[in-house]
Amino acid sequence: MNSHTFWSRILKVGGGIAMALGTLDPLEGSVLILLGSGLVALGMFLGRKERRTVLYWVWAFILIAVGVGAMMALSAAGGIGGKSGHSMWWGVLILPYPAGWLMVVAGGLAGLVRLFKARWKRAHA
């Protein structure tokens, strides 16, 4: 196993664990989810995966980063709705966060299915 493969696996597993822990509380764990998705995207890049796979994970990271950034900025500005003086429509800026999170979940499940299929084929070949 070369160093690229070794670090790729460590980053992907570490990122997956960080995202799983962040999912326990998606609001407070948003920073963990952001960090985890970045680690997985970097792990995919270092593992020299197909270009479209790397782009998928990079876009998921970008969406999560934009959504989390908007959430932090809106929170720093006093929140939205109620007596904050900001319309609830400002919440639309947060939508990239759950969209990116859903991409991460779908990509993770697809990766696990591919992994188990490959292992099953090797075991029964």
Image: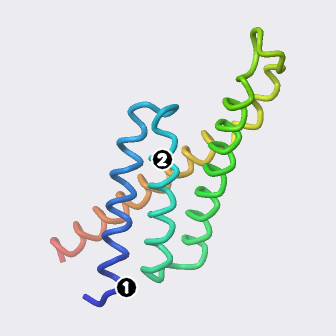
Q: Which residue is mark 1?
A: 4
State the residue lying farthest toward the bottom.
2
Q: Relative to 57, is 19 on the left or the right?
A: left
Report how far apart the C-alphas of labels 2 and 1 lie in the structure. Answer: 23 Å
Q: Which residue is mark 2?
A: 33
Residue drawn 55% across the image and 44% down it = 102
Q: Relative to 67, is 6 on the left or the right?
A: left
**Where residue 87 sits in the image (x, y, percent)?**
84, 20
Q: Amino acid at mark 1?
A: His
Rendered image: mark on residue 65:
none
Q: Relative to 122, is 118 on the left or the right?
A: right
Of residues 17 and 80, the one drawn nearer to the viewer in this rendering: 80
Which secondary structure, mark 2? helix
**Where residue 72 sits in the image (x, y, percent)?**
65, 37
Q: Quadrant of residue 120?
A: bottom left
Residue drawn 70% across the image and 36% down it = 94
Which secondary structure, mark 1? helix
What crowding class fits label 2: few (fewer than 14 Cα within 10 Å), some (14-19), or many (20 or more)?
many
Residue drawn 51% across the image and 66% down it = 41
Of residues 84 and 1, the one drawn nearer to the viewer in this rendering: 84
Q: Amino acid at mark 2?
A: Ile
**Where residue 73 sits in the image (x, y, percent)?**
71, 38
Colour convention: rainbow
Q: Relative to 63, is 109 on the left or the right?
A: left
Position above or below: 5 against 103: below
